[in-house]
Image: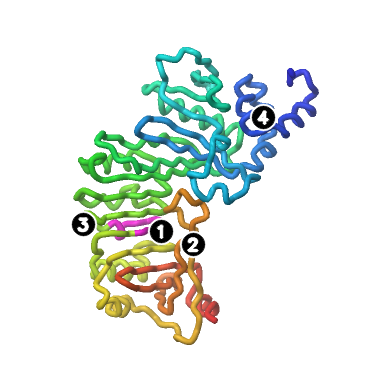
Amino acid sequence: MILSKYPLVVQEEIIDNMNHLDLLLLSFVSKNMKKLIMSSQKKTSKSIRSIEYQYNRIDGTCVVYLIDESKPLEKYHRRSSRTEDDVIMRIVKFDEDKNDNVQFSVSGKMIDFRFDGEYKYPVALYHEGDKELVFESIHNLFLDVFGDALEYNWEEPDWEKSEEFFVPFIPKLKNVSFFIGLYLDGQFADVRNFKNFFSSSPVAKTIQLYVNKKMKPLSPESKFFDAESVYIDTHRINCPDFLRHFRGREIFLDGNRYRKSRLIDIVNRWKSGEALQNLEYAQISNCCEIQLQHLVLNEIGAKFIDANRQPPTHTVRSLVDWYDRNYTTSPLISHRYIVRETDNRVASVDMMGGVFWIGVWDKTEEEFLKMIE
């Protein structure tokens, strides 16, 4: 079937009823065909929830998933449940031993592809020297074909430890949220690599950091502190105070002792409006001895709700578990709260078993008290 022989209205109807993978493949045919697809963009992308880049920094392979809203949501609660049916492209290093490649112009860049029958989707190839340009060109193609209204996520977890040094690869892509996992040990044995990585990379949306090596404090201006959500595991070693300069929405500290004096200071700085102005939720584990919990609550000026009344439940959507897009923070139901002086904003607070929680409400004290049963 030669699509261009049909009237325009028929072409548009055919395109509107094609699946996402076929549309992507059709965009390679010609500039005119790509323009026609782009003109139908709102219709073609209406069922797409997100496009997920999942990059393996060890072998340099990137699998691109297209998450279709029309499929059952439960299917995507865990990344491991995704199948080859969800893949729209694979991007891999160029293999000199294979010569069955074809070239297409993608966003002005000639890129090698394989269509060898092993996969139903195209496999894009890159040489190390033009790696970032290949990713940028392919991403621009997705923006053209599927639009910029949907979510684009780059996930680069680092669960596979290796003796080799693998700096995360974070290309500068438009409209993309980055989810990064890092071990501060062999991979960043020199902490300067850690600092340089954040200074030269786009701001990450979520960072999971495992600190296994002593490090010096980061600069207060570091883009690390601009991430929306951060999970920091410091079980093996003491580390700097990541909380003091945090500018994001939620932070989880798990591991070494967070000193009582630090905790009191940072909470009081939130109350005065000096710090953590964007905070929505924080969970700080092992922050002080259990017997000192009441002292901490007194020092931060926690107010109390009558024990016979039911306080509201605080939860927010969390990004620290990128395997589960519907993950929310554990319900915080507390009879204790604090108030920020600058805007009268309320935060529920609680301590139990050496863990401190704070959940910030988008409510003034008067509005908050009206929520109490």
Dot placed on the residue nearer the N-terminal end, 4 or 1:
4
Residue 246 vs residue 311: left or right?
left
Dot placed on the residue nearer the N-terminal end, 1 or 3:
3
Q: Residue tagged by mark 4?
A: 37
Q: Residue tagged by mark 3?
A: 238
Q: Is residue 359 magenta?
A: no
Q: Residue tagged by mark 1?
A: 250
Q: Are marks 2 and 1 in contact (CB under 8 Å)?
A: yes
Q: Are marks 4 and 1 in contact (CB under 8 Å)?
A: no
Q: Residue tagged by mark 2?
A: 316
* Helix, strand or loop for disc 3: loop
Q: CA distance from mark 2 to mark 1?
A: 9 Å
Q: Position of residue 291 (x, y in %)?
A: 25, 78
The magenta segment: 242-252
Few, some or many residues within 10 Å of mark 4 (<14, 14–19, 20+): many
- Whether residue 372 is visible here, answered yes or no, is yes
